[in-house]
Amino acid sequence: MRNKITKAIFPVAGLGTRFLPATKSVPKEIMTLVDRPLIQYAIDEARAAGITEFIFVTSRGKSALEDYFDHNPQLESELQKKGKDDLLETLKSTNMDSGQIAYIRQHKALGLGHAVWCARRLIGDEPFAVILPDDVIAAEKPCLQQMVEAFEETPGNMVAAMEVPMDKAKNYGVLKVAKDHGSLVRVGGMVEKPKDNPPSNLAVIGRYLLTPQILENLSSKETGAGGEIQLTDAIAKEITEGRDVFGYRFQGQRFDCGSKAGFLQATVAFGLARDELRDELAQYLHEVVNIDKAAQ
Ligand code: G1P
């Protein structure tokens, strides 16, 4: 088995019902933070980590995603004619070369584990990454790159991890810590969305580096939390069979863009990070806070 990770799976088959009515016709992953779709943040992070093959697990109604990564020669030539070089560069940076990107359909919504399993033939016998585009992570060094560097030192299954308030642990995959080395944690068990008594408050965030054995584990199609085939369970099986699983406490700020509040927070944070927007947005936020205070 190779140790270099060049393939990433992006599970994007979800219906995005929390964002209805927008998601009636727009895939959730195309929704924008400032001016970039969620999926673009995920792709940029993958590229920075050395990923060169992008595998999308999609479903009905996601064709806008395929169009997004297509070249748009008409738009490119218009921008060129008008001398809009900056915009042209921005546009070209979203292009994917032929053969770099593959789309697989998940025909039934059977869970995250099942979505990953759908891509098994494109993965073969290599370690691979999984990125959940709902989890947007602002970081100086992109999160997946941090993990790939850790993986090169310490190969094994690795999940991004973050401390969450104990009462929120039920919304996540949760790690049982066997040994805490600081940024790296040896995982002694994993539970998907524990109803009560979570083994810790160290939650799994949507970045994974996985060995191909996980795909084997998923092929038994056992269901877990919520009646779904869970990726967490397939990773936990590695631990019971004596193979390594690590949690990686990444540096950076994670936004849960699967929720409206998280999406709005990310919009503000990414807006404030942009030179051309910062002053105007900061002033507006200031005014809003003052109006709010005055009203109380
Ligand atoms: C998924 C995973 C969960 C993980 C979470 C991170 O859950 O199943 O283990 O903690 O992503 O965002 P979801 O939020 O898709 O229900």
Image (cartoon, helix red, strand yellow):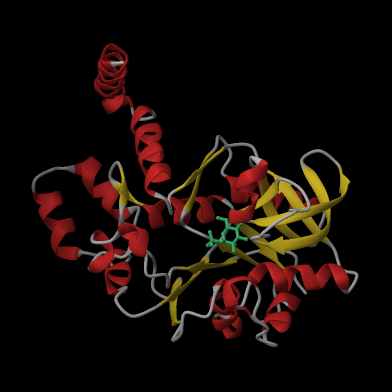
The mark tally for this picture is 0
x and y percent of residue 216 in the render? Answer: 72, 83
Residue 238 figure quarter: bottom right
Q: Residue at x 58, y 64 (%)?
A: 130
Q: Residue at x 67, y 43 (%)?
A: 166
Q: Quadrant of the N terminus?
A: bottom right
Q: Does residue 13 appear anywhere in the picture? A: yes
Residue 86 figure quarter: top left
x and y percent of residue 292 in the render? Answer: 29, 19
Q: Quadrant of ligand 1?
A: bottom right
x and y percent of residue 120 in the render? Answer: 60, 82
Q: Residue at x 53, y 77 (%)?
A: 115
- Front-lying residue, 141 or 162: 162
Q: Does residue 95 appear anywhere in the picture? A: no
- Front-lying residue, 150 or 182: 182
Report whether 291 appears left or right of 184. left
x and y percent of residue 119 in the render? Answer: 55, 80
Q: Is residue 234 above or below residue 246?
A: below
- Front-lying residue, 253 or 36: 253
Q: Quadrant of the C terminus?
A: top left
Q: Is residue 33 above or below residue 56?
A: above
